[in-house]
Amino acid sequence: MTFVLPPPYRIEPNGTHPAYDVADYRSTALRAPTRPLHLLPQRLTELTGPVFGTDRVRPGDADLTNYDGGEAAGQRIIVHGHVRDGDGRPVPDALVEVWQANAGGRYRHPVDQWAAQLDPHFAGGGRVVTDAAGHYSFTTVKPGAYPWQNHLNAWRPAHIHFSLFGRAFTQRLVTQMYFPDDPLFFQDPIFNAVPDAAARARMISRYDHEVTTDHWALGFRFDIILRGREQTPFEEGG
Amino acid sequence: MGTPSQTVGPFLAIVLPWPDGPDVVPPGTPGAVTIAGRLVDGAGAPVPDGLIETWQADPAGRFAHPDDPRGPAERGFRGFGRCATAADGSYWIRTLKPGPLPAEDDALEAPHIDVSVFARGLLNRLVTRIYFPDEPAANDADPVLSALPPDERARLIAAVDPDGALRFDIHLQGAAETPFFRL
């Protein structure tokens, strides 16, 4: 019997992802590849991927606001959403890793020299796993904007870094979640490296009053869409 | 219409490295090989804020994953490695050499490891593959390698260090630029 591979994952439309070489983002200059990329057909290694359960998540990993026995400073927020593929199917049991600056815009990292104070009670990062419906949720504080060296008076809009595995090597995604109506988008070369305006909008979370909790925290919703799959012959027939 | 990719930025080490990240297999596993190398930028400088991830089949060519149409690998083989680069750009993993893989039209993929590279300045991950130097015949027949120009083919085959460890340096740019793939 001839060996048949599972259906591959669809390639996203042009403009969904940034180019590698983006002149306005200076760090790409010596790091972006200069030769054309080769197409890697999706075979077994690309159609499978690491599967993580809750074994990678420790108690407390879904709350970044009470590190070392105290309360983090800043606006407490609940960030939640669904991880789905491009066909709307939930992605369950997917490891989601997040990291961010504290409320003052300072990262818990030795390279970060911004003068804002470190917060002894802000963890800086967390991990969650999506449930059977592909839903995730964690509690944190709204990160501050912070300056960087890229251009004169350069400030990163407030953002939370997300790392997702999905179901297959091909679906691996690292992205950043932004906040609605941030006045700093216009001058940020990382956000604007995504060519398509509708795609950029998919990186912006929405305020979610249903999740906002009285006298506790504001809610934000950030749905993440990983690559969808080509149809199987069965689905085409049905 | 997916969510766009963004860079990991310079602070990925806050959460992404795991203490056992490089251990695709635990220390002391019989037959384990170490693969080590450096991540280097276009000026030849080490990249100290990168992350290397690997994904591969087990020695029998099976994956610990439900979508493997031949059935999943034996339980316990993680298949996944992850190592942040050090100040000198170095990374390493400890693993078992994967088996060859069936492909369409009776083709056979040579033993290989898929690699993702993340770093500040990379707005998308970069994807490459590590092949093995002791598989010349399988490498010649591999459908991915054989589609590359000859000079690029050689750059995807790991070198052997004097101590027997395998070496796979990743050059983001330059005369020795590593061949990268789009998926």
Image (cartoon, coloured by chain):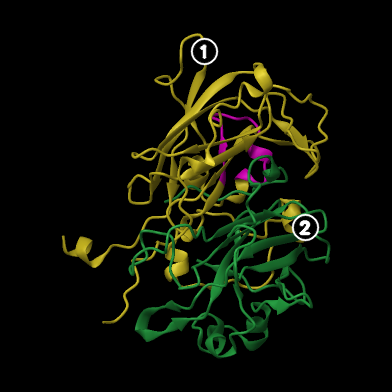
Chain colours: A yellow, B green
Element at badge 2?
loop
Crowd rating for badge 2 (residues with CA inside 10 Å; few <14, some 14–19, many 20+): many
The residue depicted at 73 percent of the width and 76 percent of the height is: B164
Residue A178's disc is none
The answer to whether mark 2 and mark 1 are in CB contact below 8 A is no
The structure residue drawn at horizontal position 59% and vertical position 89%, both measured from the top left corner, is B136
Q: Check the image and name the residue furthest to the top.
A: A215
Which image quarter: residue A92? Answer: top left
Which disc is residue A216 wearing? Answer: 1
Residue lying at 73% horizontally and 70% vertically, measured from the top left: B169
Q: Mark 2 vs mark 1: same chain?
A: no
Tell me which amino acid carries mark 2: Val
Say which of A33 and A134 sits in front. A134
Q: Name the subunit of mark 2.
A: B
- Percent across and percent down for residue B22 are 65, 56
> Which portion, as a residue range, is magenta?
A175-191
Residue A143 in which image quadrant = top right
Q: Is residue A31 visible?
A: no
* Residue A85 appears in the figure: yes
The correct choice, above or below, for B109 with respect to A103 in the image is: below
- Report x, y in % for residue B85: 74, 55
Q: Is residue B8 magenta?
A: no
